[in-house]
Structures are given as C-alpha cells and as structure tokens.
Image: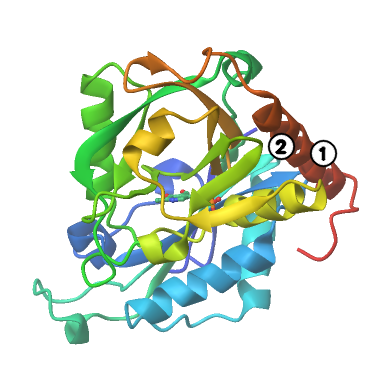
Amino acid sequence: MAIKVYMSTAGRPLDPAEATISVFDRGFLYGDSVYETLRTAGGAFVDMRRHLERLRTSAAGIGLEVPYTDQEIRRIVRETCEAAANPDSYIRIVLTRGTGALMIDPRVSGDPQLVVIVKVLKQPPLALYERGISAAIVDVLKPGRRQLDPSLKTGNYLNSILALQEAIDGDAEDAILCNAAGAVAEGATSNVFMVSGGRVLTPSFETGLLKGITRTVVVELAESQGLEVLETTIMPDQLRAADEVFLTSSVRGVMPVTRLDGVAVKDGAVGPVTRRLLHAYREYIDAVARGEGGPS
Ligand SMILES: Cc1ncc(COP(=O)(O)O)c(C=O)c1O
C-alpha cells in the first residue's frame, strides 16, 4: 500500500518525496487549477466517465485547455493505481495552468501540468454513519456564478476552508453554506439533502452549487426506489426543521447529519430514508466492485 503521484513533467508515477511542483506553478500560487476526486471499488473506477466530463466542464469554465484525451487520462490514472497497489484507492486528478511569470495574467502560463495523486482509500469509520455527524450553517457564503462559480471544481478552495474553520470553531464537524440570497447551497465539500414528510429535497442547481456526482447517483437511486425527489430552494429554517439531513460526496458516500447548529435533527438518530439511501449507495458501490456497475 502506497501513495503514488503521477506528474506530467516526469511522465510516470513517482514516490511522494520525488513528486515536487514548481513554486511558480499557478495552481500553487493562485489556485489556478481544476480537479476531481474519485475512488475505486474492487479496483474499478467509480463514475470515471462523469468525473472526466466534469473535469472538462471545469477546465472549459476557466478557459483551460485539457491537453489529454479521456483515454490518456484513464491510462495514466490506471498506471498510477497499479503502481500504488492499494486494495482500493482515493484518486485526485489535478490539472493546473502550469508555470509562468509571476503575474496573474493567464496568457503568461506555460503548459498545463497534470498531477494524479493515488493513496489508499480511507473512509470515515462505520460508527460515524451510525451516529451521524454534526454540521453548522455558517456565515461564510457560497460565491455566486459570477464570482468563484460553484459549478466549477477549481483548486481555489479557500472559501470552503474558511467555512469549515468556522464550523469547527463552533464545535461542528462540517459546514453548510448558503448563497447570497440566504438559501442553503451545499456543504464545504459535499451536497446537501433533507427529508421532509417522506419527500427527499435538495437545493436546485439554480441555487449555485457543484453538480455532485454522488448527488446525481443518489437522486437516481431515490427515484428508482419510488421516493419523490424535489430539487428546489431550501431556506436554513426548513433545513433545521427537517426530519432528516444528509450530505453526499464521492469519498464519504451518504453521510447522515444528526445535529444541526447544535440542535438534534428530529430525534437525533439516523432517519429511515437516509438509512435506505445509505444502503442503496453502498449496494451501488458493491455492484461497481463486482463489475456490474455499467460503463464507468
Ligand atoms: C463543494 C463541493 N460540493 C459537492 C461535492 C460532492 O461532489 P461529488 O459527489 O462529485 O464528490 C464536493 C466534492 O468534493 C465539493 O467539493
């Protein structure tokens, strides 16, 4: 089990100590990069096709050309996973605008730098899924489409870092951010769902959020189970009054939230709909591991 890092400058997977980046790299200097985080299950990529699609959308959104085909990126990721030889891997694919003169002008950048970091997949302990986590609706706002467009997964995460810091300072384990209009948008590194009267609600894209791949899968799973799903505007008081709240992301899957702003969500236990979707998502991952997950 190991950490391996592919760097386009080296052209092969490296040990972490060898994997160094220029101090002039714009990803380092300005967060001028895009990235994806995904995982394997039974050695198979989970939702690679959707992650590559989103990487391209993010890159196009910041005017960054991706100088690789999907097949090339898949090959590089596969080789890095093979070199790491983990039972299952956490994979981060990063594309920066490269190095250049010390100016923000994007025209002075050189070639994009591709970095693929592979390490052993470490998920939260099962006990956390049983008790659920605490979250806080923080003061830090989700930027709008005309600021740091939240639908693009860029390397500029300071906003989420500050949101998480605020949550931690308030004794919560995770942060939920609202948009400038005061509507609930998403978590620091996750999408938000609530259950009310048996219906599953999640903020609509118009709210301004990342099109989470787990969010999409969970919506599909919920609908296939006959649950009604509504993509809509959710205000903080609605979220606080919800029967159930949970977060979704590629590494954590479905994570129940059982305390919100220091108060128990309903009775403070993981609710039945969350439990159902948590299991459905685990089965989805298990199917990928068995090679029954369809094209990825
Ligand atoms: C801001 C933000 N929203 C949502 C997500 C969840 O996205 P996904 O389900 O594709 O991992 C992430 C994941 O890192 C994120 O950073």
Return the residue at label 1.
Answer: 283
What residue is at 75 percent from the left and 32 percent from the top?
276
In terms of depth relative to the viewer, which is nearer, 107 or 54? 54
Q: Is there a contact, CB below 8 Å, between mark 2 and mark 1?
A: no
Foreground tag (2 vs 1):
2
Residue 116 at x, y = what percent?
A: 51, 57
What residue is at 77 percent from the left and 46 percent from the top?
43
How many residues crowd around disc 1 within 10 Å: few (fewer than 14), some, or many (20 or more)?
Answer: few
In terms of depth relative to the viewer, which is nearer, 247 or 25? 247
Quarter occupied by residue 80: bottom right
Quarter of the rendering occupied by the C terminus: bottom right
Describe residue 24's horizontal placement relative to residue 247 as left or right: left
In terms of depth relative to the viewer, which is nearer, 247 or 182? 182
Residue 123 at x, y = what percent?
A: 59, 29
Task: Relative to 160, say whether 261 is above or below.
Answer: above
Marks 2/1: CA–CA distance: 10 Å
In terms of depth relative to the viewer, which is nearer, 43 or 139? 139
